Amino acid sequence: MGVQREGSQDPIWQSPADSRWYAHYQAVEMQRKGERAEEEDRLLDEHGFERSPTEGRRERWSRCEQGSLGRYTRSQAVTQAMKEGS
């Protein structure tokens, strides 16, 4: 469905008139993100991370580390938990 512009490497995506494929694509992406979020939440819980108040638009997580409180963004906490899990 992608149409390649002359001289460009990025496809331009054109939706069909009824847009059904796009609605399906969006539903699949939302499901993937939800499944990934559930798995990440489980991983963070297993490694002692707790959700902290959000600052701005960033989700914050924290946990006690050697007597002090370590603060992380969600992506930092997930990365740390994955390092510790391997």
Image (cartoon, rainbow, N blue to C red):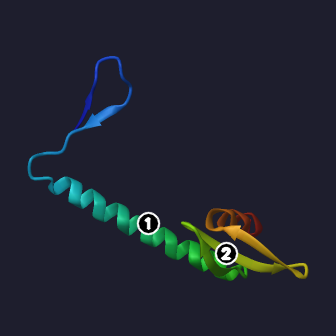
Left/right placement of residue 82 relative to residue 66 reads left
What residue is at 79 percent from the left and 74 percent from the top? 70
What residue is at 23 percent from the left and 60 percent from the top? 24
Disc 1 to disc 2, how far (Cα)? 19 Å
Q: Position of residue 53 (x, y in %)?
A: 62, 79
Look at the picture and state if 16 lies above or below 73: above
The residue lying furthest to the left in this view is: 17
Callout 2 amino acid? Trp
What residue is at 19 percent from the left and 54 percent from the top? 21
Look at the picture and state if 85 lies above or below 14: below
Q: Position of residue 47 (x, y in %)?
A: 72, 78
Q: Which mark is residue 33?
A: 1
Residue receiving disc 2? 61
Pick whichever of labels 1 and 2 is earlier in the sequence: 1
Q: Position of residue 52 (x, y in %)?
A: 65, 80
Residue toward you, 30 or 69: 69
